Image: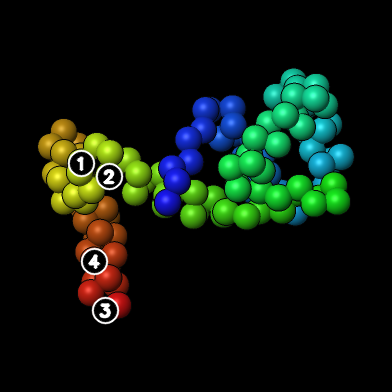
Amino acid sequence: MEPLRFDSMEFRFACLIWERAPISSGDLVPLCGEVFGWKKSTMYTMLRRLCQRGLFRNENGSVHVQITREEFESRQSEQFVKESFDGSLPRFLAAFCAHKPLSEEEIDELRALIDAQRRK
């Protein structure tokens, strides 16, 4: 799986689309002008980049989601653990907990996730 790398503006733009998709590209132009201060050409350049990466599809002037935000975040987190901790989730959690103790709520959530994985 190809890692999806984004700069902060690309991610903010993607979030804007995820919140509103499907949306017409014509409606995105004034929205991006208002939110980001972009011109029409800038919006279309950014949209083209994200479409080329397979995140969205601009078909007949309508922008559709190809990869959901949840799927994107899942891929990003998998890639981070792979690159930073040799793919070891336990090593990641150990490093994370070394300087920030988990709350009881977080521990319960993690136990629920682990239990759900065991049932699969």
Q: Please rate how many residues cluster around mark 4, counting C-alpha atoms within 10 Å: few if below 14, some from 14 to 19, many from 20.
A: few
Q: CA distance from mark 4 to mark 1?
A: 19 Å
**Residue labelled with disc 4:** 114
Quarter of the image with the C terminus is bottom left
Disc tally is 4
What amino acid is found at the position of numbered circle 4 in the picture?
Ile
Instruction: Looking at the image, tell me whether mark 4 or mark 3 is earlier in sequence order.
Output: 4
- Which dot marks residue 119? 3
Q: Position of residue 97 (x, y in %)?
A: 16, 41
- Which dot marks residue 44? none
Q: CA distance from mark 4 to mark 3?
A: 9 Å
Pick the front one: 115 or 89: 89
Q: Position of residue 32 (x, y in %)?
A: 75, 30
Indicate left or right for 12 with 22 as reference. Answer: left
Pick the front one: 35 or 44: 44
Report the mark closest to the observer, 4 or 2: 2
What amino acid is found at the position of numbered circle 2 in the picture?
Lys
Q: CA distance from mark 1 to mark 3?
A: 26 Å
Q: Please, which residue is most extreme toward the bottom here?
A: 119
Q: SS of the residue at dot 4?
A: helix
Q: Position of residue 36 (x, y in %)?
A: 70, 24
Q: Is residue 8 above or below residue 104?
A: above
Q: CA distance from mark 4 to mark 2?
A: 19 Å
Report the mark closest to the observer, 2 or 3: 2
Q: SS of the residue at dot 2?
A: helix
Q: CA distance from mark 2 to mark 3?
A: 25 Å
Query: Would you say the residues marked 2 and 3 are in contact, meaning their CB atoms lie under 8 Å apart?
Result: no
What amino acid is found at the position of numbered circle 1 in the picture?
Phe
Pick the front one: 108 or 26: 26
**Residue labelled with disc 2:** 82
**Residue labelled with disc 1:** 85
What amino acid is found at the position of numbered circle 3 in the picture?
Arg
